[in-house]
Amino acid sequence: MVFTGSVSFSTFSAFHVFGARSDAGAARWMPPPARVRAPLYNRAAMHFTIFDTPIIRDLFRWLSIVMLRLCGWKLKGAFPAQDKYVMIGAPHTSNWDFPITLGLCFAARAKIYWMGKHTLFKGPMGPVMRWLGGVPVARHQNNSLVQQMVDVFQRSDRLVLAIPPEGTRKAVKEWKTGFYHIACGAGVPIALAYLDYGRKEGGFGPLFQPSGDIEADMPRIRAFYADKQGRYPR
């Protein structure tokens, strides 16, 4: 069931991590304390993004509304007002899914984050990727990707993490389960977002609270998407 209504949005505060400085009054002969680098995911949590940039945010919102209407797309449901949750989106069958999803997010005044390999955030493109909502994750670290994102949630007051459960545009029989384990580990619900090319509508369904029993929960989650049609039906 899809719920319709006005879209609500809570502004996300910026998150900053400052390096430690030695006390100015400390004895000069003492060596300076070693700088401890914060984990990638800690430094990236709740940072300023394109969805916070006033002029660009408002311009993109109106452009998105106009383009969606011209293309015949409708926004359904209200962006969940809860502070923290994992948002999944399906079905994912085309490269067009990304710009349409981005347009729907701007139209709904939604602010989302997404995960990206930490190497994408190095060099001059790093600030750009963060501004676009990226959160760097390092797979080579001892702690798993799931635990990294659980830590992000625990350090954040507000966070909406968007994850495509299929993980690819190709047809897959089984979804990747990382989104489920992140939600369970962080103790947050799962928002069911979707694109339906058959009806030319996209939006937000209900929040699903995982029980921890993935065998029981996954069929219920996938049932919500049973009547949703991708650009290339499977």
Image: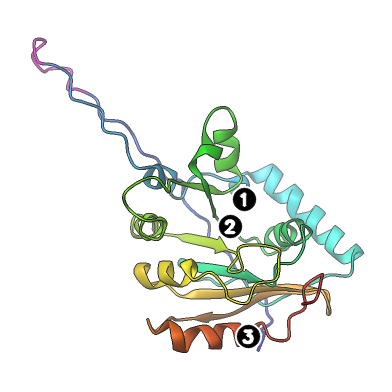
Left or right: 5 in relation to 197: left
Q: Is residue 30 above or below residue 7?
A: above
Give whichever of 184, 65 is nearer the camera.
184
Q: Marks 3/2: CA distance?
A: 23 Å
Where disc 1 sits, the SS reads: helix
The residue tagged 2 is: 111
- Is 28 covered by the magenta stretch? yes
**Could you tell me residue 119's position as x and y percent?**
51, 38
> Dots 3 and 1: beta carbons under 8 Å?
no
Left or right: 190 in relation to 19: right
Given the image, on which type of amino acid does mark 1 rest?
Phe
Where disc 2 sits, the SS reads: loop
Q: Is residue 158 above or below residue 50?
A: below
Where disc 3 sits, the SS reads: helix
**Could you tell me residue 66's position as x and y percent?**
86, 59
> Dots 2 and 1: beta carbons under 8 Å?
yes
Kindly identify the residue that appears in the image at 77 percent across and 62 percent down: 94
Q: Is residue 44 above or below residue 200?
A: above
The residue tagged 1 is: 51
The quadrant where residue 146 appears: bottom left
**Magenta stretch bounds:** 22-30
Q: Quadrant of the N terminus?
A: bottom right
Kindly identify the residue that appears in the image at 21 percent across and 26 percent down: 34
**Could you tell me residue 77's position as x and y percent?**
67, 77
Q: Marks 3/1: CA distance?
A: 28 Å
Q: Marks 2/1: CA distance?
A: 6 Å
Given the image, on which type of amino acid does mark 3 rest?
Phe
The residue tagged 3 is: 224
Given the image, on which type of amino acid does mark 2 rest?
Lys
